[in-house]
Amino acid sequence: MMLTIVTPADDRNLLSIEQLRVAAGFASSDASHDMDLARIGLGVSDRIARECGIAGDGVRPPTLKRETVEQTFRLSCPVSLLLLARRFVSGVTSVSIDGEAAATSDYELDASAGMLRRLRESRPAMWQPATVVITYAAGFDDVPGDLVLAASVAVQEQWSATQRDPLLKRDRVDGIGEQEFWVGGIGGAVPGAFSSTVQALLEPFRTMWVS
């Protein structure tokens, strides 16, 4: 399988600058930290894409924002379904089989599963050995609420890290002081790039690869 980005996303950031400001605890109109927030926001968005297993082309960072991609399958045996590398598919632009364009009636998209089914006379059929090239759009123009929340929490945690450790659970000062930390992230013990709160919010957006 080979993936090529035909039309990359204009902006990989999952949050607008106003959302970034609010996530960091500023007023939505406060532009005093925009450069730092944009950098943190883009870093968080790229890490979320990697955490969710979004496929890339090896050139550009993968993203959950909408992109047009071209995926090539070189089939050596018949298969019933073609698994698209990107989920959240909004439409298939074209399909070619050994260089010949397939009619839209020759295939059917299962958008939620990210799969393309071969049709023959409106009935499911097998994809036969061939080189199949699929051009399709995948990702979000309007970022879903749970994904916005996940990115916002992650930005808040990272911004807080510039002020204090966001994993600090309790900081009591009674003469000599005492600090207690969350283990594995805020609210739970899940290892990885993000806290357990963010991990849970990202669950619906993960791509599960089957070997």
Image (tube, rainbow, N blue to C red):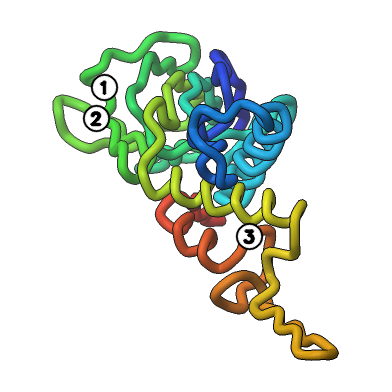
Q: Earlier in the sequence, mark 2 or mark 3?
A: 2
Q: Is residue 17 above or below residue 45?
A: above
Query: Which residue is labeled 1 in the image?
Result: 106
Mark 3 residue type:
Phe
Marks 2 and 1: in contact by CB < 8 Å? yes
Residue 211 lies left or right of residue 80; in this view the side is right
Q: Position of residue 120 (x, y in %)?
A: 21, 27
Residue under the point 31% across and 43% down: 112
Position of the C terminus by quadrant: bottom right
Is label 1 in a helix, a strand or a loop?
helix
Query: Which SS class for mark 3?
Result: loop
Residue highlighted by disc 2? 119
* x, y percent for residue 17: 55, 28
The amino acid pointed to by label 1 is Asp
Tag shown at residue 194? 3
Q: Report whether 80 appears left or right of 50.
A: left
Residue 76 visible at all: no
Of all residues, the one furthest to the bottom in this rendering is 175
Specify the quadrant of the image occupied by residue 5: top right
Q: How many marks?
A: 3
